[in-house]
Image (cartoon, rainbow, N blue to C red):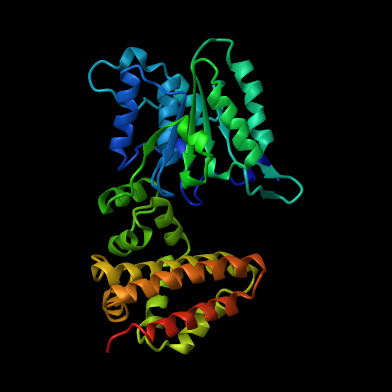
């Protein structure tokens, strides 16, 4: 397999790589917080960029890297901005993946299995020693992007911690984290956090259009993607909206399910070609349970994920007692799903089992 064919672990399938994203939507506060620190001379050596998946954390990291490597000191008079002319020499090098003072740490490719490794190994972090030696020649700023820090194994995390404890001169380390609670407390304590928020419906639509995925189903996407452009693209790429509509149809008569529809859903997840659909089906069942629990606490959702969803949720989650039942079921089925996938349980059997558990729970919560 050529280098061009190897999948990039820091790129969402069907979307441009974060370094190629021209406009960052919805993260004005995180941008301003970084620029305020930079303008005040408080540029930390370590920055932890946190937030849900798919909201622009990696894009923010690449924009910060481009800003720092493009020698911004002389251009901070007036209103500072992370936006750098794409024709700037440093920006062009970054776009080409060839900037000598930028290092990217991510999950490596395993030549034996012909798959991406499941974690970032210590060898990937140890390569920084050579990077720091080679990039020190011209005395300019150096930037390291770790995408994602959640994927560092124990040895790799300890190696990054050492760099944060004794940072090289003129070096900024940007760690992207979807779940910062999984990181070593000592790593978190040595970084300044930049928090990226979920996108509102307007920013989500703009981000999708920029990524080449304009959609007229804005209400359903906003509801199901939860403000994540990455999740929205995944739904659009794999007919996730239609699949969620099938789930709602299957559950429409709860506390009794539509059994033929349930069987079709389960059978469609069988086979190697259906691996992606199987994963999305599990994710959408989890999302449905979360929305049922939330509806029991605060009422029906402002936006529907599929026609008839609001009516269904109002019936099966009428109060906070029902909300607790759905929340508990969500936790139980998450554990069941994780175990089922670990032991390669038959996908159809796992899906049907989960649907029957939903039916059983609805019998104790639904109102006529």
Q: Which residue corresponds to the image point at 66% horizontal and 37% vertical from the top-left?
A: 155
Q: Position of residue 228 (x, y in %)?
A: 38, 52
Q: Is residue 38 above or below residue 29?
A: above
Quarter of image, res 60: top left
Look at the image and tell me whether residue 360 can be seen.
yes
Q: Residue furthest top?
A: 138
Q: Position of residue 218 (x, y in %)?
A: 29, 60
Using the image as rendered, state which of residue 96 and residue 196 is in the foreground: 196
Q: Position of residue 199 (x, y in %)?
A: 31, 49
Quarter of image, res 161: top right
Q: Which residue corresponds to the image point at 41% horizontal and 29% vertical from the top-left?
A: 64
Q: Is residue 162 found left or right of 283 in the rendered image?
A: right
Look at the image and tell me whether residue 102 can be seen.
no
Q: Quadrant of the C terminus?
A: bottom left
Using the image as rendered, state which of residue 322 and residue 152 is in the foreground: 322
Q: Is residue 307 above or below residue 121?
A: below
Q: Is residue 59 above or below residue 64?
A: below
Q: Report the number of numbered marks.
A: 0
Quarter of image, res 257: bottom left
Q: Which residue corresponds to the image point at 59% horizontal and 10% vertical from the top-left?
A: 137
Q: Which residue corresponds to the image point at 23% horizontal and 65% vertical from the top-left?
A: 302
Q: Position of residue 180 (x, y in %)?
A: 47, 43
Q: Residue furthest right?
A: 112
Using the image as rendered, state which of residue 67 and residue 51 is in the foreground: 51
Q: Is residue 135 above or below residue 104?
A: above
Using the image as rendered, state which of residue 168 and residue 280 is in the foreground: 168
């Amino acid at each position: 397999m050529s280098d061009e064919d190897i999948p990039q672990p820091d790129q969402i399938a069907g979307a441009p790589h974060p370094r190629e994203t021209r406009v960052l939507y919805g993260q004005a506060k995180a941008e301003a917080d970084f620029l305020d620190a930079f303008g005040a001379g408080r540029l930390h050596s370590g920055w932890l960029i946190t937030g849900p998946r798919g909201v622009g954390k990696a894009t923010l990291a690449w924009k910060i890297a481009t800003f720092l490597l493009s020698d911004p000191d002389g251009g901070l008079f007036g209103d500072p901005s992370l936006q750098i002319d794409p024709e700037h020499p440093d920006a062009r090098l970054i776009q080409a993946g060839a900037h000598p003072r930028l290092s990217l740490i991510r999950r490596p490719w395993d030549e034996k299995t012909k798959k991406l490794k499941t974690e970032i190994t210590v060898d990937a972090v140890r390569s920084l020693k050579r990077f720091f030696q080679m990039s020190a020649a011209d005395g300019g700023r150096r930037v390291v992007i770790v995408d994602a820090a959640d994927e560092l194994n124990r040895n790799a995390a300890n190696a990054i911690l050492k760099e944060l404890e004794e940072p090289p001169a003129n070096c900024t380390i940007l760690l992207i984290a979807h779940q910062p609670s999984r990181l070593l407390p000592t790593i978190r304590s040595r970084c300044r956090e930049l928090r990226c928020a979920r996108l509102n419906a307007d920013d989500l639509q703009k981000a999708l259009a920029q990524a080449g995925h304009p959609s007229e189903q804005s209400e359903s996407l906003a509801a199901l993607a939860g403000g994540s452009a990455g999740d929205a693209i995944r739904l659009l790429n794999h007919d996730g909206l239609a699949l969620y509509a099938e789930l709602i149809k299957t559950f429409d008569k709860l506390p009794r399910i539509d059994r033929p529809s349930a069987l079709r859903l389960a059978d469609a997840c069988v086979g190697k070609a259906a691996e992606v659909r199987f994963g999305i089906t599990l994710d959408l069942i989890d999302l449905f349970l979360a929305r049922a629990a939330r509806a029991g606490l605060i009422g029906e959702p402002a936006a529907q994920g599929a026609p008839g969803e609001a009516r269904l949720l109002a019936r099966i989650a009428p109060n906070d007692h029902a909300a607790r039942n759905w929340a508990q079921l969500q936790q139980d089925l998450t554990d069941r799903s994780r175990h089922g996938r670990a032991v390669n349980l038959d996908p159809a059997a796992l899906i049907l089992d989960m649907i029957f558990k939903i039916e059983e729970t609805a019998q104790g919560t639904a109102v006529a």
